[in-house]
């Protein structure tokens, strides 16, 4: 039976309508979908540990509980390690606020001298900006309050996803025709290993960047160096935009707590060196070599994720686009979309890409060894 071909305008209209409907659902169900998305990523990271415990004849439920407790303990240790810095920042907040007011007063005087902009005019502009940002502040407070609910729901979602993972896999097999079961099995297996290696690589990269940031800020003498270093490593997960914010935070702290500008210059130089090491050494060798998103797509998805789900969407956008690329690369009909998302630029005159095979990254070797062990 010959497959019916639909005209381009009809197919494009259906696709556009589907995208609009998907955007509407993502925007209006953000409070429900955000914790589910984080839970999915955490479940992928904990799945190898659960499988390893089950290999040693630990019951399934107990294996999941042990993995969750270890993950919660690791996060708790990080917060405990940073608690002294957070407490010190809270105690010195009035002094920092007073110092910031002095710097702001000096800046207002400089603007008046250089550009003839009176202090009253500056205050008027600030008030207008504050009025325009009331909605943003309200959304931020709602996000902060919603974070409590997310934290409480995350362990429950992760537990249920790990508990019902065989049911989810069986559903995926049932969706496709029986003659495609072997191909589905190959795609699921490859996709699982690639996603796990990508997420493990991101964690390893963030840990190394956090250590480098903290050491650099400690050597320079910036207050709350470890806290700012860890925050910088987390922000570094946001391509380009996060790196810029990560530099601004310690520069502001140095400006508020010290006189002169030598410390600020040292911070910018140190962070530039760390960014160079991260982009040219850590990412190619540690993060999955098979999941590289090009710069244009990275910036677009981060901005779109922020527009849909706020800060959480900015952090989730890159991992989920990476997951989509992994799936696109392994499905014949979707390979052009995977090529569009990737960073492999064709070098041949006819669009062919004469690239060398990249060696496996550290994360891919770790995940691959654990998969062989199972």
Image (cartoon, grey):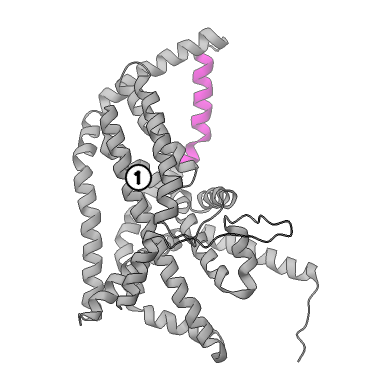
Q: Is residue 122 magenta?
A: yes
- 25, above or below 374, in the image: above
Image quarter in which the N terminus is found: bottom right
Q: Position of residue 292 (x, y in %)?
A: 51, 57
- 208, above or below 193, in the image: above
At 35% from the left and 16% from the top, the residue drawn is: 260
Q: Position of residue 283 (x, y in %)?
A: 43, 51
User: Which quarter of the picture shows residue 4?
Assistant: bottom right
* Of the pair 303 and 219, the residue shown nearer to us: 219
Q: Is 364 on the left or on the right of 71, as rendered?
A: right
Residue span colored magenta: 120-137
Report the number of discs.
1
The reply to whether residue 38 is in sight is no
User: Which quarter of the picture shows residue 261?
Assistant: top left
Could you tell me which secondary element the residue under label 1 belongs to?
helix
Q: Position of residue 119 (x, y in %)?
A: 49, 13
Q: Is residue 55 magenta?
A: no
Main secondary structure along the magenta-highlighted residues? helix
User: Which quarter of the picture shows residue 361?
Assistant: bottom left
Q: Is 123 on the left or on the right of 96, as rendered?
A: right
- 296, above or below 223, in the image: below
Q: Which residue is mark 1?
A: 209
* Of the pair 20 and 266, the residue shown nearer to us: 266
- 130, above or below 260, in the image: below
């Amino acid at each position: 039976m010959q497959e019916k071909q639909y005209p381009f305008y009809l197919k494009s209209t259906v696709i556009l309508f589907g995208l609009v409907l998907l955007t509407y659902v993502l925007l209006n169900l953000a409070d429900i979908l955000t914790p589910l998305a984080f839970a999915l990523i955490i479940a992928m990271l904990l799945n190898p540990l659960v499988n390893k415990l089950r290999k040693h004849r630990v019951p399934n439920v107990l294996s999941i509980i042990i993995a969750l407790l270890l993950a919660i303990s690791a996060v708790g240790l990080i917060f405990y390690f940073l608690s002294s810095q957070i407490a010190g920042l809270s105690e010195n907040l009035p002094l920092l606020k007073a110092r910031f007011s002095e710097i702001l007063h000096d800046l207002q005087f400089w603007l008046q001298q250089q550009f003839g902009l009176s202090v009253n005019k500056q205050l008027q502009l600030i008030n207008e900006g504050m009025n325009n940002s009331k909605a943003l502040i309200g959304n931020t407070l709602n996000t902060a309050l919603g974070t409590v609910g997310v934290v409480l729901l995350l362990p429950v979602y992760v537990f249920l996803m790990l508990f019902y993972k065989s049911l989810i896999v069986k559903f995926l097999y049932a969706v496709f025709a029986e003659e495609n079961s072997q191909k589905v099995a190959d795609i699921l297996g490859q996709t699982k290993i690639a996603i796990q290696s990508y997420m493990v690589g991101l964690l390893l990269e963030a840990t190394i960047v956090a250590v480098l940031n903290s050491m650099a800020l400690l050597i320079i003498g910036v207050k709350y160096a470890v806290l700012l270093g860890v925050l910088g490593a987390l922000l570094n997960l946001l391509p380009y935009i996060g790196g810029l914010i990560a530099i601004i935070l310690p520069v502001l702290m140095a400006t508020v707590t010290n006189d002169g500008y030598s410390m600020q210059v040292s911070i910018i130089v140190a962070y530039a060196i760390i960014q160079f090491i991260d982009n040219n050494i850590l990412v190619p060798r540690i993060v999955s070599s098979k999941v590289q998103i090009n710069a244009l797509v990275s910036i677009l998805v981060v901005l779109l994720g922020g527009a849909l789900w706020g800060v959480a969407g900015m952090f989730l956008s890159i991992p989920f686009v990476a997951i989509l690329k992994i799936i696109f690369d392994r499905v014949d009909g979707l390979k052009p979309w995977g090529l569009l998302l990737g960073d492999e630029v064709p070098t041949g005159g006819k669009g062919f890409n004469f690239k060398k095979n990249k060696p496996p990254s550290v994360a891919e070797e770790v995940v691959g060894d654990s998969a062989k062990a199972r």
